[in-house]
Amino acid sequence: MRGTGTNDAGELAQQWLDLTDEERVAGLRSLGREDADELFLRLSTFHQLELLLHMPPAERRTWLRLLAPDDAADLIQAAEGREPREQLLDLLDEAGRREVSALMAYKQDRAGGLMNPRFARVRPEMTADEAIAYLRLQASGVETIYYVYVLDQEQRLLGVLSFRDLFNCPKEQPIQTIMRGGYLSVTDDTDQEAVAAMFADSNLLAIPVTGAEGRMKGIITVDDIVDVVAEEASEDIHKFGGTQTLELPYMEAGLWSMIRKRAGWLAILFLGEMLTATAMARYEGYIARAVVLAVFVPLIISSGGNAGSQAATLVIRAMALGELRLRDWWRVLWREIPAGLALGSVLAVLGVTRVLVWQAVAGTYGQHAVEIAATIGVSLIGVVLWGSLVGSLLPFVLRGAGLDPASASAPFVATMVDVCGLIIYFGVAGIVLRGTLL
């Protein structure tokens, strides 16, 4: 096997991305059963699927049945278009097939699509000793036993208790007197972002999922949410960069998929930049009389775009962390006005210094250097202030319209600011340079 030369799971995991699919299968087969199971469970859904698709059906059955129902559902859904779902579902036992099929009925970004239907459960009338004996029977079939869930005959969730509570009470004490009723739970249609926020606020290891009339359907564990957070972060980063989300790893995505997901935004941004060309044409008379103004156009519009991108990044991240709500837009406005003025003033000092130094050294700007410096300085203050306001408020506009604030991508903000930046720049030039260069 090329590049491995070892039966060590850790070494194989490090070399994983450099191996072909056939070498990965051979490497997994070379490991001991325990190491192979551990490595397989650590792989992403994409790499687990790739392995299964390069194995004979008998081996597929073994590995697919190793997965928890929620992970098996993710893998089978990821196989859509490459392998019939029915063929993969048929590899599961009857109970697993029912569980996975039920999970696949939910949207993948809902709590029902994330939950594991296997969890530790007891009845309220049991004694502590009976509950411990009953949990021993369940131990091999549940994902986690950090928490024990108390259900009635109708499978409604009555309360939760930890193993510490269970072991620290008298053997004959009824469960209903130990359980805690003030538990956190989510419904099966709760969005995954809301679930992730609950985990962040509560520091729990698992949260129960309930359906109609409070009937418990499963649990979501913190490791499931780690995957969700990574997925949501990737989606937001892609959007903020001006591209659609890639479902596959970058090196595994096809050329056509890459083009399709990037071309739309590029076309939209190109059409937006046409307005910049239109604005330039509107002021071509200014440029013809004072060519020096054209030299500073990239400096002016890039400064506004950069300021807008900074503001948008800060606001979008604050929204994602729950630090800002829709009604906070006015507070952001009053923070960004002084911030934009201050940042613009910093750049204005640098811009004015640049003009005056070049004039002193080489006489580049002639007898009207001071007026040109003033134009640059005032324009930078105005453009940076405008960019900060647009970048900070656009996410609120998008959220208010029911859209993802991350759609206020850096290129999109920069394009919006470019057009207005040119208007501000040439407007200031028309006032300051009237009667001299213009």
Image (cartoon, rainbow, N blue to C red):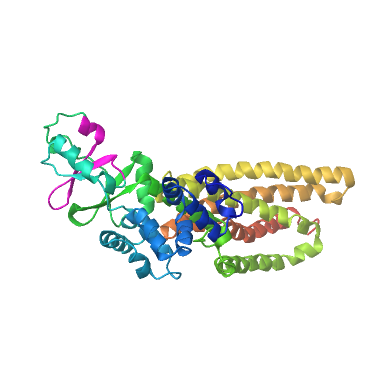
- Is 222 magenta? The answer is no
Residue 133 versus residue 372 in the image, above or below:
above
Outermost residue on the right side: it is: 362
Percent x, y of residue 299: 72, 53
Residue 414 at x, y percent in the picture: 61, 57
In the picture, measured across the screen, residue 364 lies left or right of residue 63, that is right
| Residue placed most toward the observer, 411 or 299 | 411
**What residue is shown at x 67% (from left), y 41% (from top)?**
346
Query: Looking at the image, is 108 positioned above or below residue 184?
Result: below
Give whichever of 276, 423 is nearer the camera.
Answer: 276
Is residue 164 in the magenta section?
Answer: yes
Query: Is 114 situated left or right of 251 in this image?
Result: left
Quadrant where the N terminus sits is bottom right
Q: Residue at x 57, y 70 (%)?
A: 256
At 49% across and 47% down in the image, what residue appears? 317
Among the 4 quarters of the image, the one containing residue 58: bottom left
Residue nearest the viewer, comparing 70 with 133 = 133
Where is the C terminus found, in terms of image quarters?
bottom right
Q: Position of residue 417 (x, y in %)?
A: 61, 57
Image position of 287 with respect to 302: above or below: below
Q: Is residue 242 visible?
A: no
Viewer-side residue, 373 vs 236: 236
Which x, y percent locates residue 244? 52, 62
Residue range in magenta is 144-167
Q: Is residue 146 visible?
A: yes
